[in-house]
Every structure is written in structure tokens, then in C-alpha cells.
Amino acid sequence: MKRKLQGKYVTISTVGEKAQAFVPAPLPPCPPINWTPELRNKFDQALLSLGRLDSVSALLPDTSLFIYMYVRKEAVLSSMIEGTQSSLSDLLLFELDQEPGVPLDDVREVSNYVAALEHGLGLLEKGLPLSLRLLREIHGVLLAKGRGSGLTPGEFRRSQNWIGGTRPGNAAFVPPPAHEVLECMGKLELFLHDQPEPTPVLLKAALAHVQFETIHPFLDGNGRLGRLLITLLLCEQKVLREPMLYLSLYFKAHRQYYYELLNNVRLVGDWEAWLDFFAEAVIVTATQAVETAQQLLDLSSQDREKVKGLGRATPSTLCVYQALIEHPIATSVSLVKKTGLTPATVNKALSHLGHLGIVKELTAQKRNRVFSYADYIKIMSRGTELPSQ
């Protein structure tokens, strides 16, 4: 099958020079995707993996706690791809109003991501379809505070942007001119709403992600929003009951290849290589999420058993332990507030949890001590480790 450019180049004039900007053809792809038996099989496997992941959310004793941490892990990873230096512990400390060990803007960016995802899911629950309005609203939250807040949050760009390089003339990729953005996004919205034809949801997520990244409709935050789009689509279409699938870790691990595949779609229409990669990302990521959930379940049941051996101190210590599962970095003050126990009882429980090796103190001070449920954070942090400076 002969390959072809998936769009057209237009000449733009900006910063005193001419450059070629790429305007993608609307979806679905033309010529249609070549569904080899191998590719079809890969997509079937990916759907099975999603089914397993969805059923795990029914096994978890409290799905919201797992989601709470999982969303934060994704926020850290997705922001890391953009060069942000923030760990999961930094984010949890920031949410506690303690001092994170990295620049405040980095953690604020990650915190915005959590808020943006929660806002998007809330709008979907209220019945707002996945639409340009919803994407703009999420973007407004994503760039509300910190870096990027001066780059028109919640509005499609009115000026030219580019990827890589110092100007459009030496960029790795130049997205459509600003006056073409609304039309391109309007066609993407139609595709999301099954026009001109219905598209199976996993395939729709894979195609829409590339299209969104190619249009690059905002001045900042496109990468993070394009990755969120995948999860929001799976949740809106009820493939997942809970937002438990995030591909950022896989994209981060295969970053160079990921960018290469996006470019090959644009230049020669090689959708098949991208779809193979995307299906593999879903299989690997969903399997990892199932394993993580299982490890957290095992850890929690082992640690509860340890606490049950404490005799009379068991009920209050279990109460503090439960609060630490909900927020694995906490201060004794926040635990008093959360549990309703007296400061003396909370401190005694923390002492027991320390002796049992469940809790570690992060500070060596008399007041405002910070405690960490270290093994829980360790399981959740896999893949988010910051490279050593």
C-alpha cells in the first residue's frame, strides 16, 4: 500500500523568516489502516488488559485511595516528560504545606495536573461530552498557577508555536498556523463524536492522541493534555470505570521512539507502527497497574496483621494507619485532625508504627514532625525516580 503525507504543508512567515507549517488531514486516516492479523491481535490483547484492569478496581477495598495515589503518580510522570523535577514525595509534601525539596514551580505544575484531571472527570460525570469546551476548561486548570500561567490558559493559541529548535526555521516540527487551529480542532471534535463514522474506542484514543499533538492547539501544556485525553476518552466511553490507565511511564521510557512514530505518521502515514506501539503501551501499563494494586493490597494486609498484635493499642493505631494509607506523608497535627484522636494517642500510635517498621519519620525535630508510610510510597513511586543530579 502506497504511503502518503497525512496533511499538507503551508508556508508561514514569522520572526522575519519563512517556514513550513504542517496542517494534518482530518481523521479517520486515508488510506484506511491496514489491519494485519498481528496488529488486530495486539489490539485484542490491549482490550483484554483493560478489562482486567477495570475488574481490579472492583477488588480494591477502597478504590478512591488507590486512584488518589495513582493520579498523583501520573501527574509526576507526565510533568517529568516536560522536564519538571518533582517526585511523588515532593507532591505529597506540597499538598501538606511542608517544604518540598525541589523548586516550587515544579511541584505546583504537578499539582495543577492533578486538579486538571479531577476537573475533567467531574465535567464528564455531569454529562459534558469530551469536546473542545471540556479540553479548554481542563487546560485552564492545568495552567492556572505557576509556569505557563501567562500563556493564555484555556484558550487556543493565536500565534505560531513550534517543537524543538529556537525558532520555526530550525524546529523539529511546526504545527498548523494559528488561524487553522480552530478548524483542525473542530474536525477532531467531530471524530471524537463518531463523525463521519463510528470508531472503536481504543483505536479512537490512539488516533486522537496523535492528532491532538500534531495540531498542538495551545501555547503550553499540549503534551500533558494530549496524554490526559487518552484516559478521559476511556472513562467517558465506560471502558474504564475509574481513571486507572496512564501511558506516561511507557512514553517516558521510550521517548525517542515515541516522537519518531508521531513524525512517521505525519510524513508517510505510518499509522500501523504507531498503533502497534500504542497497543503495547496499553498492555504493559495496564498489567503494571494490576500488579501495583496487588502489591498495595498485600502490603496493607501484612501491615494490618502486624498492628493487630499490639493488644490494647490496636484500635487507635489502626485508625492512624488507615489515615496514612489515605495520605502516606502526614504530620502528627494532620493525623490528629484526620482521626479525631488526641495528640498523645496519635503520637503513641506513630511510635508503635515506627517500632513495627511501618512508618518512618522524615524530620528529626520535636514539633511539626513529618511521617512517611515508606513502603507504600516506594511501591507507588516505581518508574518516577528522578535521575541523580
Image (cartoon, helix red, strand yellow):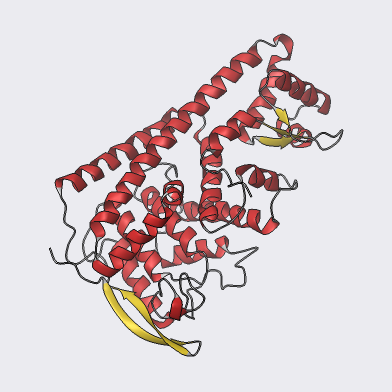
Quadrant hosting residue 8: bottom left
Residue lying at the far left in this picture: please name it. 1
Is 78 situated above or below 265? above
Is 195 situated above or below 383? below
Left or right position of 26 against 144? left
Quick one: 258 or 304, which is closer to the camera?
Answer: 258
Left or right position of 257 against 363? left
Residue 46 position in % (x across, y down)? 29, 42
Is 3 situated above or below 388? below
The N terminus, quarter of image: bottom left
Quick one: 200 or 207, which is closer to the camera?
Answer: 207
Residue lying at the far right in this picture: please name it. 366
Residue 233 position in % (x across, y down)? 37, 53
Residue 65, can we see it? no
Left or right position of 278 against 157? left
Residue 24 position in % (x across, y down)? 31, 72
Residue 389 position in % (x across, y down)? 64, 50
Left or right position of 364 against 236? right
Residue 195, can we see it? yes
Residue lying at the far bottom in this picture: please name it. 16
Residue lying at the far front in this picture: please name it. 389
Quadrant hosting residue 188: bottom left
Identify which residue is drawn at 55% across, 41% down.
68
Identify which residue is drawn at 38% across, 39% down.
286
Is 159 situated above or below 205? below
